[in-house]
């Protein structure tokens, strides 16, 4: 099967798009947070690769063309931010301080859990960049000596988990301020969380887009410093 698939350059693209389309249809029918299209798509792709005995490298030959779209897609998130520039100006201090606190808390929590469960150093290094968008996370992981594949899994897990449970946490904690909701989605759950924030409202989407950028910049600074001190 690997030989047949490797002859088709766009197999990875086709199966990825088809799986996501199925995920969208499932979400339309059952409007529950757990039915995240990306989560469903991942499960479908994994099932297809496993059942058809196709290795990841063969699948990635075609799927990599979708990866190329990550950067321009992230840049497009600046559009809602531009539309809500006045909201940004009024909340600059609160936004920067909250995101900074979130980045520091993220690093400390990861290190704390890793030490508690005796996780190997290389896995800790791989997980530390998980709350930023994929291109930045891969760059950080490579710089500090992590395993990029593990980093990507961490990024996807953080994004999907945040988009699924985020709205419920807001409801339980009675967080109704759009700026706070947007930052709460974007800072830990990057682009995947932002897609959910955009569904919640334009202000939420704009603030979540901003959180991606600021979190990425702060993480690039904080993580290497922490790893230099800890490892």
Image: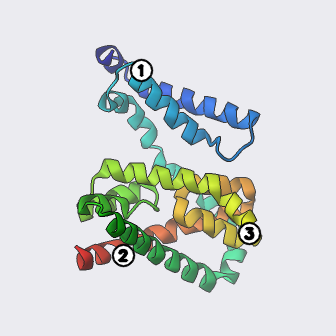
Q: Quadrant of residue 202?
A: bottom right
Residue 228 seen in this snapshot: yes
Residue identified by numbered label 3 = 178
Q: Quadrant of the C terminus?
A: bottom left
Q: Secondary structure at mark 1?
A: helix
Q: Residue at x 60, y 86 (%)?
A: 93
**Number of numbered discs present?**
3
Q: CA distance from mark 3 to mark 1?
A: 44 Å
- Earlier-in-chain disc, 1 versus 2: 1
Image coordinates of residue 71 in percent, x first then y, are 46, 51
Q: Which of the labelled discs sits on residue 221, or is there none?
A: 2
Q: Residue at x 38, y 72 (%)?
A: 112
Residue identified by numbered label 1 = 51
Q: Residue at x 41, y 20 (%)?
A: 51
Q: Is residue 38 above or below residue 226?
A: above
Q: Is residue 10 above or below residue 145?
A: above
Q: Quadrant of residue 97?
A: bottom right
Mark 3–mark 1 CB contact (< 8 Å) = no
Residue placed furthest toward the bottom: 93
Q: Secondary structure at mark 2?
A: helix
């Amino acid at each position: 099967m690997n030989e047949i698939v490797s002859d088709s350059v766009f197999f990875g693209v086709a199966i990825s798009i088809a799986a996501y389309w199925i995920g969208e249809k499932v979400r339309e029918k059952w409007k529950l947070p757990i039915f995240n299209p990306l989560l469903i798509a991942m499960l479908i792709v994994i099932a297809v690769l496993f059942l058809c005995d196709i290795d990841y490298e063969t699948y990635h030959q075609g799927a990599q063309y979708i990866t190329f779209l990550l950067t321009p897609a992230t840049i497009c998130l600046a559009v809602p931010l531009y539309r809500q520039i006045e909201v940004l100006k009024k909340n600059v201090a609160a936004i920067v301080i909250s995101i900074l606190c979130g980045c520091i808390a993220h690093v400390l929590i990861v290190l704390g859990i890793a030490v508690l469960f005796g996780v190997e150093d290389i896995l800790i290094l791989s997980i530390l960049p998980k709350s930023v968008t994929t291109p930045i996370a891969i760059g950080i992981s490579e710089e500090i000596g992590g395993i990029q594949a593990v980093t990507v899994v961490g990024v996807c897990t953080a994004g999907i988990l945040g988009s699924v449970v985020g709205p419920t946490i807001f409801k339980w904690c009675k967080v109704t301020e759009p700026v706070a909701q947007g930052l709460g989605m974007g800072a830990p759950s990057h682009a995947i969380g932002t897609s959910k924030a955009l569904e919640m409202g334009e202000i939420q989407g704009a603030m979540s887009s901003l959180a991606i950028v600021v979190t990425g910049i702060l993480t690039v600074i904080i993580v290497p410093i922490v790893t230099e001190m800890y490892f």
